[in-house]
């Protein structure tokens, strides 16, 4: 367990960067420090491994006061991942991952073997081992940074906005990769971000920092979204916190309906495109007499929607982008987003390989949301 007891950090200006911080961070869980810029979350993180020394108070890790441990030894006992990965540009990927192991006097052959195992653990192939950082994408560099941080099998992993410098698609992939690793390794992870969506996706517990270096609320993400403690927290999590809260309601009970599909580039079939069209209220948001058909590739992966009105069956139609997807295991938030972002009004459901399994309907998602709300109270 990591504990802060009355910890403050005051710089020469006299204004506290961190003010009387008292936190108990649970072992084996992800705790996220979240808040606006300049609120003390990164300073708090860096005081754990003594990159920043506190002005007052005590920080303990596993019951030991960190001030009693030599700073180099303390830092080698923890994993640390920063925003830009911080890889040594003149060393190969393998040598970068081996850095802490070699500092800890692990024999070279053993360190290289362990490093290759870790590359596989973070989703990189062994063929990457001899590359240099400038030969990797931003997402790959961050994966190497995570592998390096895990090399010495540290009980505590500190992550300072590690995914903020990559594009949104890669960021989402890295978030899911971190959650997968955590399920396997059960580290004590302290993660810093200014993004409330990222915080709620990753965190078992959130510490919402406010200006002046104080923690405004420390609670599970669902509680913070449901009942922010004050106006600052309510403003920070945003007016759409009810939508974010849907991330904690599973969507596995939603019915998946069949949907007419056509191989993209083939002739549009002369069939009605309304799944379960005998069902009341099932007609999508389209003009009278028009039909929606889902275009797929040869592997049954969605490509977009086709809308046929008065066109002949053989007339080429424009492919309309299909919105977000609802995947196996996704929460109700993703289901609602898939339905609302789809031009047809149907959210496309896909399996783990991205292949179409059917569609979800907005009305049924809303009914499931209502049922989930009623079950809580």
Image (cartoon, rainbow, N blue to C red):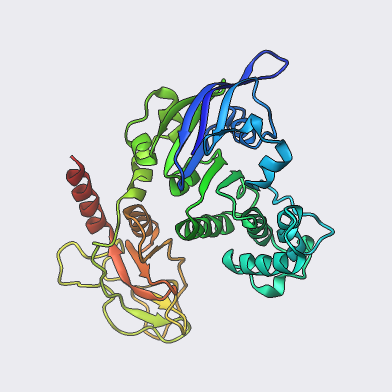
Q: How many marks?
A: 0
Q: 40 or 234: which is nearer to us? A: 40
Q: Locate residue 350 relative to residue 6 in the image: left or right.
A: left
Where 267 sits versus 258, above or below? Answer: below
Q: Residue at x 47, y 53 (%)?
A: 186
Q: 127 or 78: which is nearer to us? A: 78
Q: Residue furthest top?
A: 14
Q: Residue at x 30, y 55 (%)?
A: 250
* Residue 293 seen in the figure: no
* Residue 332 seen in the figure: yes
Q: Residue at x 44, y 35 (%)?
A: 237
Q: Locate residue 304 relative to residue 105 in the image: left or right.
A: left
Residue 161, position in %: x, y? 61, 44
Q: Which quarter of the figure has residue 122?
A: bottom right
Where 128 sits versus 269, above or below? Answer: above
Residue 305, position in %: x, y? 41, 71
Q: Which quarter of the figure has residue 8?
A: top right
Q: 225 or 118: which is nearer to us? A: 118
The C terminus - image quarter: top left
Q: 63 or 259: which is nearer to us? A: 63
Q: Residue at x 74, y 65 (%)?
A: 94
Residue 33, position in %: x, y? 52, 36
Where 2 sits versus 93, above or below? Answer: above
Residue 357, position in %: x, y? 33, 74
Where 197 sits versus 352, above or below? Answer: above
Q: Locate residue 237 relative to residue 114 in the image: left or right.
A: left
């Amino acid at each position: 367990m990591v504990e802060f007891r009355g910890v403050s950090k005051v710089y020469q200006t006299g204004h506290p960067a961190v003010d009387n911080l008292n936190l108990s961070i649970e072992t084996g869980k992800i705790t996220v420090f979240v808040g606006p810029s300049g609120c003390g979350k990164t300073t708090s993180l860096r005081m754990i491994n003594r990159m920043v020394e506190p002005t007052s108070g005590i920080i303990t890790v596993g019951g030991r006061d960190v001030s009693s441990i030599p700073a180099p030894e303390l830092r080698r006992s923890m994993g640390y991942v920063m925003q830009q990965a911080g890889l040594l540009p003149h060393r190969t990927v393998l040598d970068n991952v081996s850095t802490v192991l070699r500092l800890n006097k692990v024999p070279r052959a053993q360190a290289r073997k362990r490093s290759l195992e870790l590359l596989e653990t973070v989703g990189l192939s062994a063929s990457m081992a001899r590359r240099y950082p400038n030969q990797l994408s931003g997402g790959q560099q961050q994966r190497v940074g995570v592998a390096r941080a895990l090399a010495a099998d540290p009980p505590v992993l500190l992550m300072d906005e590690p995914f903020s410098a990559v594009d949104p698609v890669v960021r989402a992939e890295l978030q899911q990769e971190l959650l997968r690793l955590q399920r396997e390794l059960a580290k004590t992870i302290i993660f810093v971000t200014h993004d409330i969506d990222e915080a709620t996706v990753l965190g078992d517990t959130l510490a919402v920092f406010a200006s002046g270096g104080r923690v405004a609320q420390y609670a599970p993400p669902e509680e913070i979204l449901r009942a922010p403690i004050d106006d600052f927290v309510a403003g920070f999590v945003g007016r759409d916190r009810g939508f974010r809260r849907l991330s904690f309601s599973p969507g596995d009970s939603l019915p998946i309906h069949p949907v007419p599909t056509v191989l993209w580039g083939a002739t549009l079939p002369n069939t009605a495109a309304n799944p379960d069209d005998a069902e009341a209220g099932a007609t999508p948001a389209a003009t009278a007499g028009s039909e929606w058909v889902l275009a797929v590739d040869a592997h049954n992966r969605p490509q977009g929607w086709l809308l046929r009105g008065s066109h002949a069956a053989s007339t080429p139609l424009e492919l309309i982008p299909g919105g977000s997807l609802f995947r196996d295991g996704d929460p109700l938030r993703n289901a609602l987003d898939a339905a609302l972002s789809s031009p047809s009004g149907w959210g496309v459901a896909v399996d783990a390989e991205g292949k179409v399994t059917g569609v979800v309907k907005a009305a049924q998602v809303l009914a499931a949301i209502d049922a989930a709300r009623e079950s809580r109270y």
